[in-house]
Image (cartoon, rainbow, N blue to C red):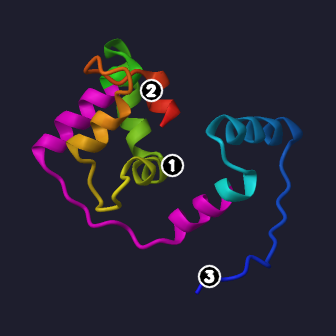
Amino acid sequence: MKLKKSETLEIRLPYPTKLAFMARCQDEGVSASEALRGFIEREIAPPAPRVVRRGWRLVAGGIIAATVGAAAVGAVAAPALAHPAAAGEFARLDTDHDGRLSAAELRALDTDGDGAISFAEYRAR
């Protein structure tokens, strides 16, 4: 049974922030309501089981290196991984919602098939 979306939530934010958010939603092909509902659902969902394997660290390092650039990895990697939005970003990439990024999910990001994930490919996903 699908629940009726009848409740509203009013938020106040600076106009430039609203414009940037609306532009980002348009770029991603979602409405502002869909984006906010998705954010709220990810925030209240129980945390996915934490599975840490050596292979995952290597894959994560490859993604960071591909999207950020080798020179900035040390400066950017630790703060970016500690950011609360990282959980939402991970959930968005985890298309089968099993709490892990599979090789197939990572290959799906490489839309030009060159064996690397560019920032444009990452952002488009």
Q: Earlier in the sequence, mark 1 or mark 2?
A: 1
Which residue: 37% across, 20% down? 112
Residue 9's tag is: none
Which residue: 29% across, 38% down? 106
* Range covered by the magenta-colored residues: 36-64
Q: The residue tagged with tag 3: helix, strand or loop?
A: loop
Which residue: 45% across, 50% down? 92
Which residue: 44% across, 31% down? 122
What amino acid does circle 1 point to?
A: Ala
Q: Is residue 50 left or right of residue 24?
A: left
Work out how far the residue at label 3 is from the one at label 1, CA to CA, in angstroms. Answer: 27 Å
Give the label, 1 or 2, closer to the camera.
2
Q: Which residue is mark 2?
A: 121
Give the label, 3 or 1, closer to the camera.
3
Q: Is residue 36 left or right of residue 94?
A: right
Give the label, 3 or 2, closer to the camera.
3
Q: Main secondary structure of the magenta part?
A: helix
Q: Which residue is mark 3?
A: 2
Residue 101 locus on image (x, y percent)? 27, 48
Q: Is residue 54 left or right of residue 71?
A: left
Q: Is residue 76 above or below residue 32?
A: above
Q: Earlier in the sequence, mark 3 or mark 1?
A: 3
Residue 85's tag is: 1
Crowding around mark 1 (Cα neighbors within 10 Å: few <14, some 14 to 19, many 20+) is some
Q: The residue tagged with tag 2: helix, strand or loop?
A: helix
